[in-house]
Image (cartoon, rainbow, N blue to C red):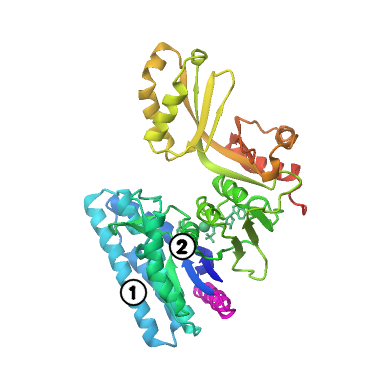
Amino acid sequence: MLIVMKFGGTSVGSAERIAHAAQLAVDTAAQGHQVIVVTSAMSKVTDTLITAARLASSGEWDPARREELFDRHQAVADALLGGDAARRGAVVEVLGQRLDRFEKLCFGLSMVHELTPRLMDAISGTGETLSAPLLSAAIATKGRPSQAIDATELIVTNDQFGGAEPLMDETRVKAGARLKPVIERGEIPVVTGFISATADGVMTTLGRGGSDYSAAILGAVLDAHEVWIWTDVDGVMTANPSEVPEARTLADISYSEASELAYYGAKVLHYKTILPAFRQRIPVRILNSFNPSHPGTRVSVEGNPSARGVKAVTSIRGVILIAISGTGMQGIPGIVAKTFDVVAEQQANVLMISQASSENNICFVLSAAEAPRVVNALRVALEFELSRGHIEEIAAEQQVAIVAAVGDRMRGMPGVAATVFGALGSEGINVIAISQGSSERNISLVVTEREAAGAVRALHRAFQLEKPA
Ligand code: ADP
Ligand code: ASP
Ligand code: MG
Protein backbone atom coordinates (compact mmCIF):
# COMPACT_ATOMS: atom_id res chain seq x y z
CA MET A 1 0.00 0.00 0.00
CA LEU A 2 1.02 3.61 -0.48
CA ILE A 3 0.41 5.47 2.78
CA VAL A 4 0.74 9.22 3.29
CA MET A 5 1.34 9.89 6.98
CA LYS A 6 1.23 13.35 8.48
CA PHE A 7 2.72 14.31 11.83
CA GLY A 8 1.32 17.35 13.65
CA GLY A 9 3.29 19.88 15.67
CA THR A 10 3.21 18.06 19.01
CA SER A 11 4.11 14.79 17.27
CA VAL A 12 7.39 16.43 16.17
CA GLY A 13 7.65 18.80 19.16
CA SER A 14 10.98 17.56 20.56
CA ALA A 15 13.93 15.33 19.64
CA GLU A 16 12.23 12.45 21.41
CA ARG A 17 8.95 12.98 19.54
CA ILE A 18 10.78 13.25 16.20
CA ALA A 19 12.64 10.00 16.89
CA HIS A 20 9.32 8.38 17.72
CA ALA A 21 7.65 9.71 14.55
CA ALA A 22 10.61 8.45 12.53
CA GLN A 23 10.17 5.02 14.11
CA LEU A 24 6.47 4.94 13.18
CA ALA A 25 7.33 5.72 9.55
CA VAL A 26 10.16 3.17 9.44
CA ASP A 27 8.02 0.45 11.05
CA THR A 28 5.24 1.02 8.52
CA ALA A 29 7.74 0.84 5.66
CA ALA A 30 9.17 -2.35 7.18
CA GLN A 31 5.73 -3.94 6.87
CA GLY A 32 6.13 -3.61 3.11
CA HIS A 33 4.32 -0.30 2.55
CA GLN A 34 5.47 2.70 0.57
CA VAL A 35 5.44 5.70 2.90
CA ILE A 36 5.35 9.43 2.25
CA VAL A 37 5.71 11.56 5.37
CA VAL A 38 4.26 15.06 5.68
CA THR A 39 5.37 17.09 8.67
CA SER A 40 4.17 20.18 10.49
CA ALA A 41 6.54 22.64 12.10
CA MET A 42 7.62 21.76 15.65
CA SER A 43 4.94 22.85 18.13
CA LYS A 44 4.62 26.64 18.64
CA VAL A 45 7.13 27.45 15.89
CA THR A 46 4.53 28.78 13.42
CA ASP A 47 3.09 31.05 16.12
CA THR A 48 6.59 32.34 16.89
CA LEU A 49 7.24 33.07 13.22
CA ILE A 50 3.96 34.93 12.81
CA THR A 51 4.58 37.01 15.93
CA ALA A 52 8.10 37.82 14.71
CA ALA A 53 6.73 38.94 11.34
CA ARG A 54 4.12 41.18 12.97
CA LEU A 55 6.66 42.74 15.32
CA ALA A 56 9.13 43.26 12.49
CA SER A 57 6.47 45.03 10.45
CA SER A 58 6.01 47.49 13.28
CA GLY A 59 9.72 48.15 13.29
CA GLU A 60 10.65 45.82 16.11
CA TRP A 61 13.00 43.23 14.69
CA ASP A 62 15.05 41.45 17.29
CA PRO A 63 17.77 39.11 15.91
CA ALA A 64 17.43 37.09 19.13
CA ARG A 65 14.30 35.54 17.57
CA ARG A 66 16.40 33.91 14.88
CA GLU A 67 18.85 32.63 17.47
CA GLU A 68 16.09 31.13 19.65
CA LEU A 69 14.66 29.22 16.69
CA PHE A 70 18.12 28.15 15.58
CA ASP A 71 19.07 26.94 19.07
CA ARG A 72 15.89 24.93 19.51
CA HIS A 73 16.29 23.13 16.19
CA GLN A 74 20.04 22.71 16.51
CA ALA A 75 19.57 21.11 19.92
CA VAL A 76 17.24 18.59 18.28
CA ALA A 77 19.84 17.90 15.58
CA ASP A 78 22.45 17.34 18.31
CA ALA A 79 20.22 14.97 20.24
CA LEU A 80 19.13 12.98 17.20
CA LEU A 81 22.30 13.00 15.11
CA GLY A 82 25.06 13.66 17.61
CA GLY A 83 26.77 10.40 16.73
CA ASP A 84 26.88 11.16 13.03
CA ALA A 85 28.91 14.33 12.54
CA ALA A 86 28.50 14.46 8.76
CA ARG A 87 24.73 14.09 8.82
CA ARG A 88 24.40 16.51 11.74
CA GLY A 89 26.59 19.09 9.99
CA ALA A 90 24.55 18.90 6.79
CA VAL A 91 21.25 19.35 8.64
CA VAL A 92 22.52 22.23 10.77
CA GLU A 93 23.75 23.97 7.63
CA VAL A 94 20.26 23.71 6.11
CA LEU A 95 18.70 25.06 9.33
CA GLY A 96 21.04 28.03 9.17
CA GLN A 97 20.19 28.78 5.54
CA ARG A 98 16.47 28.68 6.18
CA LEU A 99 16.74 30.93 9.21
CA ASP A 100 19.01 33.34 7.32
CA ARG A 101 16.21 33.74 4.80
CA PHE A 102 13.71 34.26 7.63
CA GLU A 103 15.96 36.87 9.19
CA LYS A 104 16.40 38.72 5.91
CA LEU A 105 12.65 38.80 5.30
CA CYS A 106 12.00 40.12 8.80
CA PHE A 107 14.76 42.67 8.49
CA GLY A 108 13.28 43.91 5.21
CA LEU A 109 9.88 44.05 6.84
CA SER A 110 11.22 46.17 9.68
CA MET A 111 12.40 48.68 7.07
CA VAL A 112 9.29 48.85 4.90
CA HIS A 113 6.69 48.34 7.67
CA GLU A 114 4.27 46.58 5.41
CA LEU A 115 3.26 42.99 6.05
CA THR A 116 1.43 41.69 2.98
CA PRO A 117 -0.26 38.26 3.00
CA ARG A 118 2.38 37.19 0.49
CA LEU A 119 5.22 38.09 2.84
CA MET A 120 3.42 36.51 5.76
CA ASP A 121 3.28 33.20 3.87
CA ALA A 122 6.97 33.43 2.99
CA ILE A 123 7.75 33.79 6.68
CA SER A 124 5.13 31.63 8.42
CA GLY A 125 6.02 28.59 6.31
CA THR A 126 9.62 28.54 7.54
CA GLY A 127 8.88 26.14 10.42
CA GLU A 128 8.10 23.19 8.18
CA THR A 129 11.34 23.75 6.27
CA LEU A 130 13.18 23.30 9.58
CA SER A 131 11.33 20.25 10.90
CA ALA A 132 11.38 18.26 7.64
CA PRO A 133 15.20 17.94 7.42
CA LEU A 134 15.30 16.86 11.09
CA LEU A 135 12.64 14.20 10.69
CA SER A 136 14.17 12.98 7.45
CA ALA A 137 17.60 12.66 9.06
CA ALA A 138 16.03 10.80 12.00
CA ILE A 139 14.51 8.30 9.55
CA ALA A 140 17.83 7.90 7.78
CA THR A 141 19.65 7.16 11.04
CA LYS A 142 17.20 4.31 11.56
CA GLY A 143 18.52 2.76 8.37
CA ARG A 144 15.81 3.76 5.87
CA PRO A 145 16.99 6.12 3.12
CA SER A 146 15.08 9.38 3.24
CA GLN A 147 15.13 12.89 1.82
CA ALA A 148 13.43 16.09 2.89
CA ILE A 149 11.44 17.74 0.12
CA ASP A 150 9.91 21.22 0.13
CA ALA A 151 6.26 21.09 -0.88
CA THR A 152 6.90 24.24 -2.94
CA GLU A 153 8.30 21.71 -5.43
CA LEU A 154 5.14 19.61 -5.30
CA ILE A 155 1.90 21.44 -4.51
CA VAL A 156 0.83 24.10 -7.01
CA THR A 157 -1.79 26.59 -5.83
CA ASN A 158 -3.51 29.80 -6.81
CA ASP A 159 -2.22 33.04 -5.28
CA GLN A 160 -4.73 33.32 -2.46
CA PHE A 161 -2.03 33.91 0.14
CA GLY A 162 -2.88 32.76 3.64
CA GLY A 163 -5.26 30.05 2.42
CA ALA A 164 -4.29 29.02 -1.09
CA GLU A 165 -6.27 26.52 -3.13
CA PRO A 166 -4.41 23.67 -4.81
CA LEU A 167 -4.48 23.26 -8.58
CA MET A 168 -4.87 19.51 -8.56
CA ASP A 169 -3.91 18.70 -12.17
CA GLU A 170 -0.67 20.68 -11.99
CA THR A 171 0.03 19.21 -8.57
CA ARG A 172 -0.51 15.68 -9.85
CA VAL A 173 2.10 16.19 -12.56
CA LYS A 174 4.68 17.90 -10.34
CA ALA A 175 4.29 15.76 -7.23
CA GLY A 176 4.19 12.56 -9.27
CA ALA A 177 7.38 13.40 -11.16
CA ARG A 178 9.26 14.33 -7.99
CA LEU A 179 7.95 11.77 -5.48
CA LYS A 180 7.29 8.58 -7.44
CA PRO A 181 10.94 7.81 -8.26
CA VAL A 182 11.80 8.39 -4.60
CA ILE A 183 9.23 5.96 -3.20
CA GLU A 184 9.94 3.44 -5.92
CA ARG A 185 13.54 3.34 -4.72
CA GLY A 186 12.21 2.48 -1.25
CA GLU A 187 13.11 5.86 0.23
CA ILE A 188 10.82 7.74 2.58
CA PRO A 189 10.34 11.34 1.42
CA VAL A 190 9.60 13.81 4.21
CA VAL A 191 7.54 16.63 2.78
CA THR A 192 6.91 20.00 4.43
CA GLY A 193 3.23 20.38 5.30
CA PHE A 194 1.38 23.71 5.17
CA ILE A 195 3.42 25.27 2.36
CA SER A 196 2.97 25.25 -1.38
CA ALA A 197 3.77 27.54 -4.31
CA THR A 198 2.07 29.25 -7.23
CA ALA A 199 2.85 28.10 -10.77
CA ASP A 200 5.48 30.88 -10.82
CA GLY A 201 7.14 29.46 -7.74
CA VAL A 202 5.98 32.06 -5.19
CA MET A 203 5.54 30.45 -1.78
CA THR A 204 1.96 30.17 -0.49
CA THR A 205 0.40 28.49 2.54
CA LEU A 206 -2.75 26.42 2.80
CA GLY A 207 -4.00 28.18 5.96
CA ARG A 208 -3.39 27.57 9.67
CA GLY A 209 -3.50 23.89 10.52
CA GLY A 210 -3.08 23.18 6.81
CA SER A 211 -0.60 20.29 7.03
CA ASP A 212 -3.54 17.88 7.25
CA TYR A 213 -4.72 19.33 3.94
CA SER A 214 -1.21 18.91 2.46
CA ALA A 215 -1.35 15.20 3.30
CA ALA A 216 -4.79 14.77 1.72
CA ILE A 217 -3.76 16.67 -1.42
CA LEU A 218 -0.67 14.50 -1.86
CA GLY A 219 -2.67 11.36 -1.07
CA ALA A 220 -5.15 12.26 -3.79
CA VAL A 221 -2.68 13.16 -6.52
CA LEU A 222 -0.53 10.11 -5.86
CA ASP A 223 -3.53 7.77 -5.60
CA ALA A 224 -2.49 6.70 -2.11
CA HIS A 225 -4.32 3.82 -0.47
CA GLU A 226 -4.64 5.57 2.87
CA VAL A 227 -3.89 8.89 4.58
CA TRP A 228 -2.90 8.72 8.24
CA ILE A 229 -3.05 11.85 10.39
CA TRP A 230 -0.86 11.36 13.48
CA THR A 231 -1.85 13.77 16.22
CA ASP A 232 -1.96 14.03 20.04
CA VAL A 233 -5.39 12.51 20.78
CA ASP A 234 -6.84 9.05 20.10
CA GLY A 235 -8.72 10.20 17.00
CA VAL A 236 -11.79 12.29 16.31
CA MET A 237 -13.75 12.43 19.52
CA THR A 238 -17.37 13.13 20.47
CA ALA A 239 -16.22 16.60 21.55
CA ASN A 240 -13.00 18.49 22.13
CA PRO A 241 -11.49 16.49 25.03
CA SER A 242 -10.02 19.61 26.57
CA GLU A 243 -13.55 20.98 26.87
CA VAL A 244 -15.46 17.76 27.62
CA PRO A 245 -13.29 15.40 29.68
CA GLU A 246 -15.66 12.44 29.18
CA ALA A 247 -15.49 12.71 25.36
CA ARG A 248 -14.89 9.37 23.61
CA THR A 249 -13.06 8.46 20.45
CA LEU A 250 -15.28 7.68 17.46
CA ALA A 251 -14.00 4.51 15.80
CA ASP A 252 -15.72 5.31 12.51
CA ILE A 253 -17.07 8.45 10.94
CA SER A 254 -18.18 9.25 7.41
CA TYR A 255 -16.49 11.75 5.11
CA SER A 256 -19.45 14.08 5.50
CA GLU A 257 -19.38 13.85 9.30
CA ALA A 258 -15.66 14.48 9.32
CA SER A 259 -15.96 17.53 7.14
CA GLU A 260 -18.89 18.98 9.10
CA LEU A 261 -17.00 18.44 12.37
CA ALA A 262 -13.85 20.02 11.02
CA TYR A 263 -15.80 22.90 9.51
CA TYR A 264 -17.58 23.56 12.79
CA GLY A 265 -14.44 23.74 14.85
CA ALA A 266 -12.98 20.28 15.54
CA LYS A 267 -9.38 21.40 15.17
CA VAL A 268 -8.15 17.81 14.97
CA LEU A 269 -8.65 18.00 11.18
CA HIS A 270 -8.15 21.02 8.95
CA TYR A 271 -11.58 21.66 7.46
CA LYS A 272 -10.50 21.20 3.86
CA THR A 273 -8.74 17.88 4.45
CA ILE A 274 -11.62 15.60 3.66
CA LEU A 275 -12.58 16.78 0.18
CA PRO A 276 -9.58 15.51 -1.80
CA ALA A 277 -9.71 12.19 0.04
CA PHE A 278 -13.46 11.86 -0.41
CA ARG A 279 -13.31 12.48 -4.17
CA GLN A 280 -11.16 9.39 -4.50
CA ARG A 281 -12.65 7.50 -1.57
CA ILE A 282 -9.25 7.29 0.11
CA PRO A 283 -9.72 6.14 3.72
CA VAL A 284 -8.34 8.65 6.25
CA ARG A 285 -7.22 7.53 9.71
CA ILE A 286 -6.66 9.81 12.67
CA LEU A 287 -4.14 8.26 15.04
CA ASN A 288 -2.38 9.20 18.26
CA SER A 289 1.41 9.30 17.96
CA PHE A 290 1.52 9.27 21.78
CA ASN A 291 -0.57 6.07 21.86
CA PRO A 292 0.07 4.36 18.53
CA SER A 293 -1.52 1.04 19.47
CA HIS A 294 -4.92 2.72 19.73
CA PRO A 295 -6.91 2.08 16.52
CA GLY A 296 -7.97 5.75 16.27
CA THR A 297 -10.71 6.95 13.94
CA ARG A 298 -11.34 5.71 10.44
CA VAL A 299 -13.05 8.04 7.98
CA SER A 300 -14.93 6.20 5.25
CA VAL A 301 -18.08 6.42 3.12
CA GLU A 302 -20.33 4.57 5.56
CA GLY A 303 -18.77 5.75 8.79
CA ASN A 304 -20.93 3.46 10.96
CA PRO A 305 -23.87 5.82 11.58
CA SER A 306 -25.11 6.18 15.14
CA ALA A 307 -28.69 5.33 16.09
CA ARG A 308 -28.66 8.36 18.36
CA GLY A 309 -28.45 10.65 15.37
CA VAL A 310 -25.89 12.99 16.84
CA LYS A 311 -22.32 11.71 16.92
CA ALA A 312 -20.34 14.69 18.11
CA VAL A 313 -20.62 18.27 19.32
CA THR A 314 -18.25 21.03 18.29
CA SER A 315 -17.85 24.76 18.71
CA ILE A 316 -16.21 27.70 16.95
CA ARG A 317 -15.20 30.67 19.10
CA GLY A 318 -14.21 34.13 18.05
CA VAL A 319 -17.00 34.60 15.55
CA ILE A 320 -19.33 37.53 14.97
CA LEU A 321 -23.04 37.41 14.28
CA ILE A 322 -24.15 40.04 11.82
CA ALA A 323 -27.87 40.78 11.90
CA ILE A 324 -29.68 42.89 9.34
CA SER A 325 -33.11 43.76 10.54
CA GLY A 326 -36.06 46.03 9.95
CA THR A 327 -39.79 45.62 9.66
CA GLY A 328 -39.57 47.30 6.26
CA MET A 329 -37.50 44.44 4.84
CA GLN A 330 -40.59 42.35 4.29
CA GLY A 331 -41.33 41.73 0.68
CA ILE A 332 -38.54 43.99 -0.59
CA PRO A 333 -36.70 41.82 -3.05
CA GLY A 334 -32.98 41.78 -3.36
CA ILE A 335 -31.79 42.60 0.16
CA VAL A 336 -30.56 39.06 0.70
CA ALA A 337 -28.95 38.99 -2.72
CA LYS A 338 -27.22 42.33 -2.14
CA THR A 339 -26.02 41.21 1.28
CA PHE A 340 -24.37 38.07 0.02
CA ASP A 341 -22.92 39.83 -3.00
CA VAL A 342 -21.10 42.06 -0.54
CA VAL A 343 -19.92 39.07 1.47
CA ALA A 344 -18.63 37.44 -1.71
CA GLU A 345 -16.88 40.61 -2.88
CA GLN A 346 -15.13 40.78 0.48
CA GLN A 347 -14.10 37.13 0.06
CA ALA A 348 -15.50 36.37 3.49
CA ASN A 349 -16.48 32.86 4.49
CA VAL A 350 -20.02 32.54 5.87
CA LEU A 351 -20.05 29.96 8.64
CA MET A 352 -23.80 29.93 9.19
CA ILE A 353 -26.91 31.71 7.91
CA SER A 354 -30.38 32.02 9.35
CA GLN A 355 -33.44 33.97 8.30
CA ALA A 356 -36.68 34.16 10.20
CA SER A 357 -39.67 33.40 7.96
CA SER A 358 -41.14 36.79 8.79
CA GLU A 359 -38.28 38.21 6.69
CA ASN A 360 -37.71 40.87 9.32
CA ASN A 361 -34.23 39.69 10.01
CA ILE A 362 -31.38 37.89 8.34
CA CYS A 363 -28.34 36.94 10.25
CA PHE A 364 -25.11 35.21 9.44
CA VAL A 365 -21.86 34.41 11.14
CA LEU A 366 -18.34 35.36 10.04
CA SER A 367 -14.93 35.06 11.62
CA ALA A 368 -14.01 38.04 13.80
CA ALA A 369 -11.19 38.89 11.40
CA GLU A 370 -13.54 39.27 8.45
CA ALA A 371 -16.58 40.85 10.12
CA PRO A 372 -15.53 44.54 10.40
CA ARG A 373 -14.75 44.97 6.72
CA VAL A 374 -17.94 43.16 5.70
CA VAL A 375 -20.08 45.36 8.00
CA ASN A 376 -18.48 48.51 6.57
CA ALA A 377 -19.08 47.32 3.03
CA LEU A 378 -22.69 46.39 3.87
CA ARG A 379 -23.39 49.86 5.26
CA VAL A 380 -22.24 51.33 1.95
CA ALA A 381 -24.04 48.82 -0.28
CA LEU A 382 -27.31 49.05 1.65
CA GLU A 383 -27.21 52.81 2.15
CA PHE A 384 -30.39 53.33 0.16
CA GLU A 385 -32.35 50.74 2.16
CA LEU A 386 -31.01 52.18 5.41
CA SER A 387 -31.92 55.74 4.46
CA ARG A 388 -35.43 54.68 3.46
CA GLY A 389 -35.90 52.77 6.68
CA HIS A 390 -36.36 49.41 4.93
CA ILE A 391 -33.47 48.31 7.04
CA GLU A 392 -33.29 49.66 10.56
CA GLU A 393 -30.04 48.19 11.65
CA ILE A 394 -26.94 46.32 10.60
CA ALA A 395 -25.65 45.00 13.88
CA ALA A 396 -22.55 43.00 14.71
CA GLU A 397 -22.78 41.08 17.97
CA GLN A 398 -19.49 40.60 19.75
CA GLN A 399 -18.26 37.46 21.43
CA VAL A 400 -20.47 34.75 20.07
CA ALA A 401 -19.81 31.12 19.37
CA ILE A 402 -21.34 28.55 17.05
CA VAL A 403 -22.13 25.24 18.68
CA ALA A 404 -22.95 22.39 16.31
CA ALA A 405 -24.36 18.90 16.80
CA VAL A 406 -23.28 16.65 13.94
CA GLY A 407 -24.27 13.20 12.68
CA ASP A 408 -25.40 11.61 9.39
CA ARG A 409 -28.32 9.80 11.01
CA MET A 410 -29.90 13.05 12.18
CA ARG A 411 -31.35 13.13 8.71
CA GLY A 412 -35.06 12.47 8.93
CA MET A 413 -34.86 11.63 12.63
CA PRO A 414 -37.57 13.43 14.57
CA GLY A 415 -36.87 14.77 18.03
CA VAL A 416 -33.22 15.69 17.61
CA ALA A 417 -33.94 19.42 17.64
CA ALA A 418 -36.23 18.98 20.64
CA THR A 419 -33.43 17.28 22.57
CA VAL A 420 -31.01 20.04 21.61
CA PHE A 421 -33.29 22.85 22.75
CA GLY A 422 -34.48 20.98 25.82
CA ALA A 423 -30.88 20.47 26.94
CA LEU A 424 -29.95 24.12 26.47
CA GLY A 425 -33.19 25.33 28.02
CA SER A 426 -32.68 23.32 31.16
CA GLU A 427 -29.20 24.83 31.51
CA GLY A 428 -30.66 28.31 31.04
CA ILE A 429 -28.59 28.89 27.92
CA ASN A 430 -30.06 31.42 25.53
CA VAL A 431 -29.97 30.53 21.83
CA ILE A 432 -29.37 33.64 19.71
CA ALA A 433 -29.79 32.06 16.27
CA ILE A 434 -30.38 28.62 14.83
CA SER A 435 -29.65 26.93 11.54
CA GLN A 436 -30.08 23.47 10.16
CA GLY A 437 -28.55 22.72 6.80
CA SER A 438 -30.85 20.97 4.35
CA SER A 439 -28.42 18.06 4.47
CA GLU A 440 -29.76 17.63 8.03
CA ARG A 441 -26.33 16.49 9.10
CA ASN A 442 -25.96 19.23 11.65
CA ILE A 443 -27.88 21.64 13.79
CA SER A 444 -25.92 24.76 14.57
CA LEU A 445 -26.71 27.40 17.12
CA VAL A 446 -25.28 30.74 18.08
CA VAL A 447 -24.76 31.33 21.81
CA THR A 448 -22.66 33.85 23.70
CA GLU A 449 -19.01 32.91 23.81
CA ARG A 450 -19.25 32.72 27.59
CA GLU A 451 -21.93 30.02 27.37
CA ALA A 452 -20.32 27.99 24.59
CA ALA A 453 -18.53 25.47 26.80
CA GLY A 454 -21.67 24.91 28.86
CA ALA A 455 -23.72 24.43 25.69
CA VAL A 456 -21.27 21.87 24.30
CA ARG A 457 -21.31 19.91 27.57
CA ALA A 458 -25.11 20.07 27.84
CA LEU A 459 -25.54 18.65 24.32
CA HIS A 460 -22.88 16.01 24.89
CA ARG A 461 -24.78 14.85 27.99
CA ALA A 462 -28.21 15.06 26.38
CA PHE A 463 -27.19 12.67 23.59
CA GLN A 464 -25.27 10.49 26.07
CA LEU A 465 -22.17 10.73 23.92
CA GLU A 466 -19.99 9.68 26.86
CA LYS A 467 -21.48 6.16 26.56
CA PRO A 468 -20.45 3.76 23.79
CA ALA A 469 -22.98 3.85 20.94
P1 ADP B 1 -1.78 18.62 15.32
O1 ADP B 1 -0.72 19.53 15.82
O2 ADP B 1 -1.44 17.18 15.46
O3 ADP B 1 -2.27 18.98 13.95
P2 ADP B 1 -4.06 19.94 16.47
O4 ADP B 1 -3.78 20.68 17.72
O5 ADP B 1 -4.20 20.71 15.22
O6 ADP B 1 -3.00 18.80 16.34
O7 ADP B 1 -5.40 19.06 16.65
C1 ADP B 1 -5.52 18.17 17.73
C2 ADP B 1 -6.32 18.83 18.83
O8 ADP B 1 -7.66 19.08 18.37
C3 ADP B 1 -6.55 17.97 20.04
O9 ADP B 1 -5.45 18.04 20.92
C4 ADP B 1 -7.81 18.55 20.65
O10 ADP B 1 -7.50 19.49 21.65
C5 ADP B 1 -8.46 19.31 19.50
N1 ADP B 1 -9.83 18.89 19.22
C6 ADP B 1 -10.89 19.72 19.05
N2 ADP B 1 -11.99 19.05 18.81
C7 ADP B 1 -11.68 17.73 18.79
C8 ADP B 1 -12.42 16.54 18.57
N3 ADP B 1 -13.72 16.54 18.32
N4 ADP B 1 -11.75 15.37 18.62
C9 ADP B 1 -10.43 15.35 18.87
N5 ADP B 1 -9.68 16.44 19.09
C10 ADP B 1 -10.29 17.63 19.05
N1 ASP C 1 2.42 24.65 11.25
C1 ASP C 1 1.17 25.10 10.67
C2 ASP C 1 0.30 25.76 11.73
O1 ASP C 1 0.67 25.79 12.89
C3 ASP C 1 0.43 24.02 9.94
C4 ASP C 1 0.00 22.83 10.77
O2 ASP C 1 0.49 22.62 11.87
O3 ASP C 1 -0.84 22.05 10.28
O4 ASP C 1 -0.74 26.28 11.40
MG1 MG D 1 -3.59 20.46 13.25
Closer mark to the observer between disc 2 and disc 1: 2
Identify the disc placed on residue 376. none
Task: Kindly identify the residue that appears in the image at 42 percent across and 38 percent down.
Answer: 348
- Is 288 part of what is drawn in magenta? no
Element at label 1: helix
> Local crowd at mark 1 within 10 Å, few (<14), some, or many (≥20)?
some
Rendering coords of residue 408 (x, y %): 67, 45
The answer to whether residue 351 is seen in the rendering is yes
> Looking at the rendering, which quadrant does residue 61 occupy?
bottom left
Who comes first in sequence, dot 2 or dot 1? 1
The answer to whether residue 72 is seen in the rendering is no
Q: Name the amino acid type tagged 2.
A: Leu
Identify the disc placed on residue 94. 1
> Local crowd at mark 2 within 10 Å, few (<14), some, or many (≥20)?
many
For residue 123, side relative to residue 422 (left or right)? left
Element at label 2: helix
- In the displayed structure, 331 sits above or below 347; it is above
- Most frequent secondary structure within the magenta stretch: helix
Rendering coords of residue 353 (x, y %): 54, 32
In what quadrant of the picture does the N terminus appear? bottom right
> Looking at the rendering, which quadrant does residue 440 occupy?
top right
- In the displayed structure, 468 sits above or below 308; it is below
Rendering coords of residue 300 (x, y %): 63, 56
Task: Kindly identify the residue that appears in the image at 56 percent across and 29 percent down.
Answer: 354
For residue 403, side relative to residue 276 (left or right)? right
The span shown in magenta is 15-33
Circle 2 sits on which residue?
218
